[in-house]
């Protein structure tokens, strides 16, 4: 029996037309004998709007928060009405949607009274996006003849209690998937569950971090030993760079797990950074596919990528970073000094992306966050500290970069007009990254793309699409 986990992102379920496309993709898989387990995101932009609701009400703007919630209610009701035409089913669904929004509004009113938004409440509020979408999408599937069974992800995805970035507990998820999902699949049903959300052992709602539906898909795929995991999105696959920044980006036909993980970690939004791990552990291929263009082959992520004649596979950018310079004239490199610095980052639960050291200074890059002043205050007990925001990390991923002489010279020649603040090369064989001003990031990506993807290897990149576009 070939079980495939199919994950549909926000843009693939953004409106009735998108949900119709999603339903026909799933129906096509079922017709070809595949047993899908479907994981869905909230409708596009809903997560952002729910977060805005939460922060508005926590600031006391009850009216503003309820107004956003009311627009979301209408959007979900309208989508449900457009998709489910059978009067009884439609009434049940719309009534259920109304009850969910009534509950959400209660939470928002409470928040506006207590004026304190904890990560736990934030997760609870934001979870409505996926809870609503999976129920609505399951109903739409059912109306189109798919034997859909909606499943509450919180009954399957057990996590720890780190709200907003909870860590899933694999062993229990595997057991629960066997108990709750497997019997449905065996009976010919298509489970439809929300991604991104889970619950801790007390049943309190948690989330896996932004973009976490990909992660859910990989967890479920790993737990159920799926034949493959399909990530359906709004672009043709993993591209040589973000097509929104670089319109002539090419589809990468095949990429290794390791390369895809680096890209995701360094900002390629097309995949959540942790997605790959559960799949790698069980050697399950991951495919990135376009729900607007389902006939396209997408990108296949496999344990070993075939040899590529081009030096790089893709260029990723992570924005909204800060750089922290720690300068100590007293022998920075004395034994134990770096440990003290990292202990401070650890205390503030802030991961460091890149580090560069000299005899008297160390520079570190981190996601800009509201703990930075506290981190700087702690660091200033050890040394002089400066920090600056609005930085971007550009990450070039490719095969054996370390082994190719002259590569750094070619990269920096391509962006000679841009000021580079920090460089990291050699830590990984497959990634070369550097830090620049955020305002220069898009220009840097376009220049690098023009320099390195002139004559791409046709075995690895979809050069046909470029030819077709240029003959248009
Ligand atoms: P979804 O809602 O399906 O999860 P996301 O918006 O999270 O979709 O991710 C898809 C988007 O990722 C694309 O629209 C694209 O703009 C962006 N993206 C960034 N880097 C890349 C890349 N290297 N390849 C493809 N898409 C990328
Ligand atoms: N809806 C969540 C988000 O926007 C999770 C996801 O879509 O993957 O972050
Ligand atoms: Mg995503």
Image: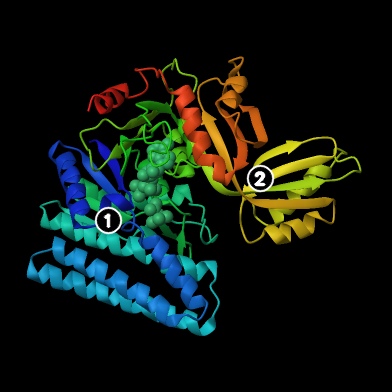
Q: Dot 1: what SS? A: loop
Question: Which residue sits at x=48%, y=68%?
Answer: 122
Screen quadrant of the C terminus: top left
Q: Is residue 205 visible?
A: yes
User: 8 or 453, which lies in front?
Assistant: 453
Dot 1, crowdedness within 10 Å: few (<14), some or many (≥20)?
Answer: some
Q: Is residue 187 visible?
A: no
Report whether 123 appears left or right of 181.
Answer: right
Residue 194, x across and y down, in percent: 33, 56
Disc 1 versus disc 2: distance between alpha carbons?
35 Å
Q: Which mark is residue 14?
A: 1
Report whether 428 appears left or right of 154.
Answer: right
Q: Please, which residue is most extreme toward the bottom here?
A: 113
Question: Which residue sits at x=59%, y=16%?
Answer: 403
Question: Which residue sits at x=30%, y=72%?
Answer: 71
Image quarter of residue 85: bottom left
Q: Dot 2: what SS? A: strand
User: 342 or 369, which lies in front?
Assistant: 369
Q: Please, which residue is most extreme toward the right here?
A: 330
Q: Which mark is residue 365?
A: 2
Report whether 421 appears left or right of 145.
Answer: right
Q: Splitting the image into four quadrants, where does ligand 2 fall?
A: bottom left
User: 224 or 86, which lies in front?
Assistant: 86
């Amino acid at each position: 029996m070939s079980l495939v986990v199919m994950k549909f992102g926000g843009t693939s379920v953004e409106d009735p037309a998108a949900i119709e496309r999603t339903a026909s993709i799933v129906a096509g898989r079922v017709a070809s004998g595949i047993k899908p387990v479907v994981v869905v995101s909230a409708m596009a932009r809903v997560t952002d709007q729910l977060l805005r609701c939460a922060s508005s009400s926590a600031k006391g703007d009850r009216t503003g928060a309820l107004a956003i919630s009311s627009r979301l209610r209408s959007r979900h009701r309208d989508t449900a009405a457009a998709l489910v035409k059978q009067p009884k089913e439609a009434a049940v669904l719309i009534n259920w949607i109304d009850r969910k929004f009534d509950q959400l509004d209660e939470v928002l009113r409470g928040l506006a009274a207590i004026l304190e938004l904890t990560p736990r409440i934030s997760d609870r509020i934001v979870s409505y996006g996926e809870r609503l979408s999976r129920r609505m999408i399951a109903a739409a599937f059912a109306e189109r003849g798919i034997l859909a069974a909606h499943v509450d992800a919180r009954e399957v995805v057990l996590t720890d209690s780190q709200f907003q970035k909870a860590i899933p507990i694999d062993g229990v998820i595997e057991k629960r998937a066997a108990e709750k999902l497997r019997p449905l699949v065996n009976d010919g049903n298509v489970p439809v569950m929300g991604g991104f959300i889970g619950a801790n052992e007390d049943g309190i709602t948690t989330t896996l971090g932004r973009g976490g539906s990909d992660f859910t898909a990989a967890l479920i795929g790993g737990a159920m030993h799926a034949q493959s995991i399909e990530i359906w999105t709004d672009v043709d696959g993993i591209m040589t760079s973000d097509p929104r920044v670089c319109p002539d980006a090419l589809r990468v036909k095949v990429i290794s797990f390791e390369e895809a993980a680096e890209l995701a970690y360094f900002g390629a939004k097309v995949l959540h950074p942790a997605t790959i791990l559960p799949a790698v552990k069980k050697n399950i291929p991951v495919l990135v596919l376009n729900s607007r263009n389902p006939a396209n082959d997408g990108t296949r992520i496999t344990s070993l990528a075939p040899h590529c004649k081009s030096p790089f596979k893709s260029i990723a950018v992570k924005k909204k970073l800060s750089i922290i310079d720690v300068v100590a004239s007293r022998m920075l490199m004395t034994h134990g000094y770096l440990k003290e610095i990292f202990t401070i980052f650890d205390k503030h639960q802030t991961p460091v992306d890149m580090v560069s050291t000299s005899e008297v200074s160390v520079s570190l890059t981190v996601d800009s966050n509201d703990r930075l002043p506290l981190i700087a205050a702690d660091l200033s007990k050890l040394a002089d500290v400066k920090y600056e925001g609005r930085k971007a990390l550009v990450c070039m991923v490719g095969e054996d970069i370390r082994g190719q002489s002259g590569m750094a010279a070619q990269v920096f020649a391509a962006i000679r007009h841009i000021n580079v603040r920090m460089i990291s090369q050699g830590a990984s064989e497959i990634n070369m990254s550097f830090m620049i001003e955020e305002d220069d990031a898009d220009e840097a990506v376009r220049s690098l793309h023009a320099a390195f993807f002139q004559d791409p290897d046709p075995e690895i990149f979809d050069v046909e699409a470029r030819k077709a576009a240029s003959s248009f």
